[in-house]
Image (spheres, rainbow, N blue to C red):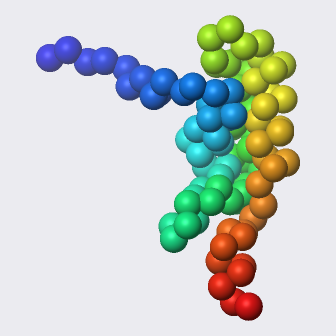
Amino acid sequence: MLMTKERRPAIRTLRGWALSVLQEAGAIHECEEHGWAQDRADPHARHRAFELARHDPPHGVSADQAVAEINDVLDSIGDSCPECSDEGQ
């Protein structure tokens, strides 16, 4: 039987790649109802995401650029869904 390594899906943007890495590492998750990315505030998962970025950046992107994008994405999302917060009002 032929065994192949599972490949990550092709990502079209650096931000999309960063979101994928953060989700794979368990650093973020999606709101089940609305789909917004939410920060899990898990330092170990963040560390895994940064390690993935350093050691396996996308083709044509430096490790420093990959780490910077992970930081940018983490800075842009919160720990709660904005739509779930609005429903309580």
Quadrant in which the N terminus is drawn: top left
Position of 53 relative to 20 (above/below): above
Q: How many marks on residues?
A: 0
Residue 54 shows in the view: yes
Side (left or right) of 45 relative to 69: left
Quadrant in the picture for residue 36 = bottom right
Side (left or right) of 84 relative to 64: left
- Residue at 57 percent across and 25 percent down: it is 12
Position of 14 relative to 48 (above/below): above
Give how far across and how far down residue 86 sits, in percent: 71, 81
- Residue at 77 percent across and 54 percent down: it is 77
| The one of 15 and 26 positioned closer to us in this rendering | 15
Quadrant in which the C terminus is drawn: bottom right
Q: Residue furthest top?
A: 60
| The one of 6 and 65 positioned closer to us in this rendering | 65
Give how far across and how far down residue 78 sits, in percent: 78, 61
Q: Residue furthest bottom?
A: 89
- Residue at 78 percent across and 31 percent down: it is 69
Residue 21 shows in the view: no
Quadrant in the picture for residue 31 = bottom right
Side (left or right) of 74 relative to 30: right
Give how far across and how far down residue 4 sits, in percent: 31, 18
